[in-house]
Image: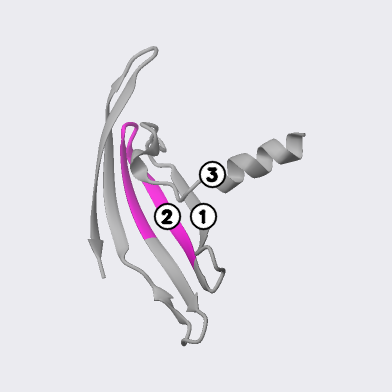
């Protein structure tokens, strides 16, 4: 039963984003996150993979700077496989409120092909 719950939770998760939660890394701390997502159509002849690496560094206790680089692979039956680096992104997140039951942050990203 525990394995089924874990597999269900894993299958519903997507790639993480800065706005998934208001938490920050903390001053002088770094985090590396690597995530993979698989997509296919109903017929199984169109399959795509995205693997993204995101490096986050805490500029201050409530401010993070992040850099993300995804690698994409798309395979369609009867066509040549396409793969390569996706749009890289540079992000900034500021946690401006941290109360007992409420944490709020704003985040912005700029992406480049």
Q: Counting residues from the N terminus, which is met first, the one under dot 3 or under dot 2?
A: 3
Q: Counting residues from the N terminus, which is met first, the one under dot 2 or under dot 1?
A: 1
Q: Is residue 93 left or right of residue 3?
A: left
Front one among 66 and 7:
7
How far separated are the C-alphas under marks 3 and 1?
A: 13 Å
Disc 1 target residue: 35
Which percent across, then down, holds residue 65? 31, 47
Q: Counting residues from the N terminus, which is met first, the one under dot 3 or under dot 1?
A: 3
- The verdict on residue 62 being magenta is yes
Q: In this view, does 58 lie to the left or right of 5?
A: left
Taking the spot 29% from the left edge, 26% from the top edge, the residue there is 104
How far separated are the C-alphas under marks 3 and 2?
A: 20 Å
| Residue 12: mark | 3
Range shown magenta: 49-68
Total of numbered circles in the picture?
3
How is the rendered protein coloured? Answer: one colour
> Up-down: is 79 above or below 36?
below
Taking the spot 34% from the left edge, 22% from the top edge, the residue there is 103
Asked where in the image residue 22 lies, by quadrant, the reply is top left
> Up-down: is 93 above or below 112?
above
Q: Are marks 2 and 1 in contact (CB under 8 Å)?
A: yes
Q: Do the residues labelled 3 and 2 touch (CB within 8 Å)?
A: no
Q: Is mark 2 on a helix, strand or loop?
A: strand
- The label nearer to you, 3 versus 1, is 3
Q: Do the residues labelled 3 and 1 touch (CB within 8 Å)?
A: no
- The verdict on residue 15 being magenta is no
Taking the spot 38% from the left edge, 35% from the top edge, the residue there is 24
Which percent across, then down, holds residue 74? 46, 74
Taken as a whole, is the magenta stretch helix, strand or loop?
Answer: strand
Q: Is mark 3 on a helix, strand or loop?
A: helix
- The label nearer to you, 3 versus 2, is 3
- Local packing at callout 3 (Cα closer than 10 Å; few below 14, some 14-19, many 20+) is few
């Amino acid at each position: 039963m525990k394995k089924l719950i874990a597999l269900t939770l894993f299958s519903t998760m997507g790639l993480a984003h800065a706005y998934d939660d208001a938490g920050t890394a903390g001053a002088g701390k770094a985090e590396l996150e690597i995530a993979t997502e698989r997509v296919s159509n109903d017929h199984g002849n169109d399959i795509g993979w995205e693997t993204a690496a995101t490096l986050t560094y805490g500029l201050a206790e409530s401010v993070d700077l992040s850099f993300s680089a995804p690698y994409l692979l798309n395979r369609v039956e009867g066509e040549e496989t396409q793969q390569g680096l996706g749009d890289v992104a540079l992000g900034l997140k500021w946690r401006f409120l941290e109360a007992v039951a409420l944490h709020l942050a704003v985040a912005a990203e700029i992406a480049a092909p």
